Image: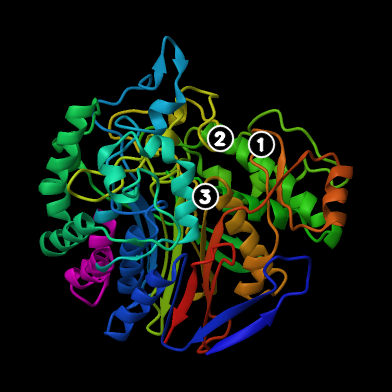
């Protein structure tokens, strides 16, 4: 059933939102067709893993500016046994990648890592989705692919968000005939809102994937077609790069916050590390007056992102200290926060045993849960809008531009303004640092929340804020996701806030010394919760995503 919640806590564009409740299963995603596909597959006997994969595959059709088979993902699965599985499907750099591949005459050339043949890593989403279904799902793999293939074949009305993104990247998309053939009309301009978008090549790809599994993708026709395009256009990805790709099973990162277990994703996700770090800092700071909280959260973000810029990278290539999520280290960082004013952060901190206690060697988020106790939090991406802007000819798949998530050179900002160190330079087979933050929250051993977000580095801050609103303030997911957001990533040293934030709150932040950058929206968060044991699941989609939906049965 639907429960309507009136949101009156602060000025909001989104006055009311429908919160979905269901007893047997729930899915929340950024597009209603994807959520409906996930719910339908549960009705047919699938579990939350089946639902999450069906949802993710459909998102690659209807929300292809954010994610798809040409990109990667991080998936957290909580099994009925209580085990939590972390599947890393992050893209990898090709074997021919070099640390200076995006430099020309010693200077970084941003366009090289953002558009065209050098911008893509080897995709990992297909590997994770296939593994998840085969190992933990209940329905055959081909069923999931067919659900997405039918939508690609029949078509769907292009959303306002997709049309706006197409218009924004028109110049770069127009460089590639295969991309124009799908996303541009007969007049040579990007498709407009409401136009029926049919993708027959993608439908054939999905059906071939459904029949041949991940092996078809990594050792069959898809790998061959992509490698051929790369050879003809100066790219580096080869058929052996596809054949060598392997998903990684990671050890989930755990911390506690005020008695709850918080389970996130370890490196190459920076999200799990820094959500844990920020929760630890806030817990160490103790109770503070409510009017101080926005300032305290902003200062906490600043400290965590300074550490991110220095320490984080692929744990197979660099030492990422586990001490970043250490509670004693958090207490030291908390002492640096002055509740009365903004304090400049000159650089990173040094967590305990930084050299020896280390982790083992645009975007969308969707959450799912079912009555058997299976929960999924999955974040998937091709990076910026329409990734590299390249569609693999004959395959209909948009390739990622995740190579931009590497540091082109130490201290050089990427498309999101993030800077990195030597720890995140490109190297053969290396996985670029990611902000994706799929998170599960437990009361004891009982899962109560699956949450995550989309929006570059704001993913981390969005996930943090959703957890704080729900756990500390007692908000329902719908109320939590509708509240105005803020984001501080250390570099540039500014505090991004949504314009909808109250004028008094913005004035207070300025008074404390924050330089505010007011923006319309910050990202998109999706959540599924079960507040009471044996009670209904409650799903909420971010009201900033007009096509989103939470659905259940």
* Residue 160 vertical position relative to residue 538 in the rendered view, above or below: above
* Residue 253 vertical position relative to residue 8 in the rendered view, above or below: above
x%, y% of residue 56? 35, 63
The local crowd at label 3, few if under 14, some if 14 to 19, many if 20 or more residues have their Cα within 10 Å, is many
Do we see residue 548 in this rendering? yes
**Label pair 3/1, CB-CB below 8 angstroms:** no
Q: Secondary structure at mark 2?
A: loop
Q: Which residue is mark 3?
A: 271
**Residue placed most toward the observer, 393 or 249:** 393
x%, y% of residue 399? 31, 43
Q: Which residue is mark 1?
A: 490
Q: Which residues are magenta?
A: 127-153
Residue at 66% in and 33% down: 492
546 relative position to 329: left or right: left
Q: CA distance from mark 2 to mark 1?
A: 9 Å
Coloration of the structure image: rainbow
* Residue 309 vertical position relative to residue 193 in the rendered view, above or below: above
Residue at 85% in and 43% down: 510
Q: Which residue is mark 2?
A: 418
Considering only order in the chain, which callout, 1 or 2, is on the residue closer to the N terminus? 2
Considering only order in the chain, which callout, 3 or 2, is on the residue closer to the N terminus? 3
Considering only order in the chain, which callout, 1 or 3, is on the residue closer to the N terminus? 3
Residue at 19% in and 40% down: 226
The local crowd at label 1, few if under 14, some if 14 to 19, many if 20 or more residues have their Cα within 10 Å, is many
* Residue 9 vertical position relative to residue 254 in the rendered view, above or below: below
x%, y% of residue 149? 23, 65
x%, y% of residue 129? 28, 61
**Label pair 2/3, CB-CB below 8 angstroms:** no
85 relative position to 148: left or right: right
Quarter of the figure with the C terminus: bottom left
């Amino acid at each position: 059933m639907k429960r309507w919640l009136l949101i009156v806590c602060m000025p909001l564009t989104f006055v009311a939102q429908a919160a979905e409740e269901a007893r047997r299963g729930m899915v929340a995603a950024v597009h209603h067709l994807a959520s409906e596909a996930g719910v339908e597959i549960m009705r047919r006997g699938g579990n939350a893993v089946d639902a999450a994969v069906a949802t993710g595959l459909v998102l690659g059709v209807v929300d292809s500016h954010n994610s798809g088979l040409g990109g990667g993902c991080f998936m957290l699965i909580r099994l009925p046994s209580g085990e939590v599985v972390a599947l890393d499907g992050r893209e990898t750099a090709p074997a021919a990648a070099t640390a200076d591949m995006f430099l020309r005459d010693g200077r970084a050339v941003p366009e090289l890592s953002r558009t065209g043949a050098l911008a893509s890593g080897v995709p990992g989403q297909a590997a994770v989705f296939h593994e998840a279904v085969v190992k933990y799902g209940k329905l055959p793999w081909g069923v999931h692919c067919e659900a997405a293939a039918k939508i690609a074949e029949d078509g769907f009305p292009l959303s306002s968000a997709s049309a706006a993104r197409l218009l924004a990247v028109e110049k770069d998309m127009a460089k590639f005939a295969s991309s124009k053939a799908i996303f541009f009309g007969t007049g040579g301009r990007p498709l407009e809102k409401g136009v029926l978008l049919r993708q027959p090549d993608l439908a054939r790809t999905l059906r071939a994937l459904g029949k041949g599994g991940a092996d078809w993708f990594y050792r069959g026709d898809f790998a061959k077609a992509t490698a051929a395009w790369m050879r003809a256009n100066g790219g580096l990805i080869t058929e052996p790069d596809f054949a060598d790709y392997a998903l990684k099973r990671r050890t989930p990162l755990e911390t506690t916050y005020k008695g709850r277990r918080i389970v996130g994703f370890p490196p190459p996700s920076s999200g799990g590390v820094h959500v844990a770090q920020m929760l630890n800092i806030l817990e160490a700071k103790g109770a503070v007056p409510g009017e101080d909280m926005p300032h305290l959260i902003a200062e906490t973000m600043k400290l965590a992102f300074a550490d991110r810029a220095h320490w984080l990278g692929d744990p197979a290539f660099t030492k990422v200290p586990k001490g970043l999520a250490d509670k004693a280290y958090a207490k030291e960082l908390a002492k640096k926060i002055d509740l009365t004013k903004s304090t400049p952060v000159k650089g990173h901190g040094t967590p305990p045993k930084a050299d020896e206690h280390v982790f083992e060697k645009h975007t969308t988020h969707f959450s799912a849960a079912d009555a058997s106790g299976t929960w999924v939090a999955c974040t998937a991406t091709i990076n910026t809008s329409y990734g590299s802007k390249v569609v693999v000819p004959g395959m209909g798949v948009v390739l990622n531009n995740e190579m931009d998530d590497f540091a082109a050179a130490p201290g050089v900002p990427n498309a999101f303004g993030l800077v990195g160190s030597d720890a995140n330079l490109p190297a053969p087979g290396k996985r670029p640092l990611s902000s994706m933050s799929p998170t599960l929250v437990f009361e004891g051993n009982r899962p109560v929340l699956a949450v995550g977000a989309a929006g570059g580095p704001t993913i981390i801050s969005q996930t943090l804020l959703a957890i704080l609103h729900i756990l500390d303030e007692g908000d329902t997911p719908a109320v939590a996701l509708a509240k105005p957001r803020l984001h501080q990533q250390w570099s540039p040293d500014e505090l991004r806030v949504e314009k909808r934030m109250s004028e008094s709150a913005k004035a207070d932040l300025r008074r404390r010394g924050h330089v505010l950058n007011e923006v319309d929206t910050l990202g998109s968060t999706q959540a599924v919760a079960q507040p009471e044991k044996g009670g209904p699941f409650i799903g909420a989609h971010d009201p900033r995503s007009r096509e989103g939906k939470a659905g259940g049965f």
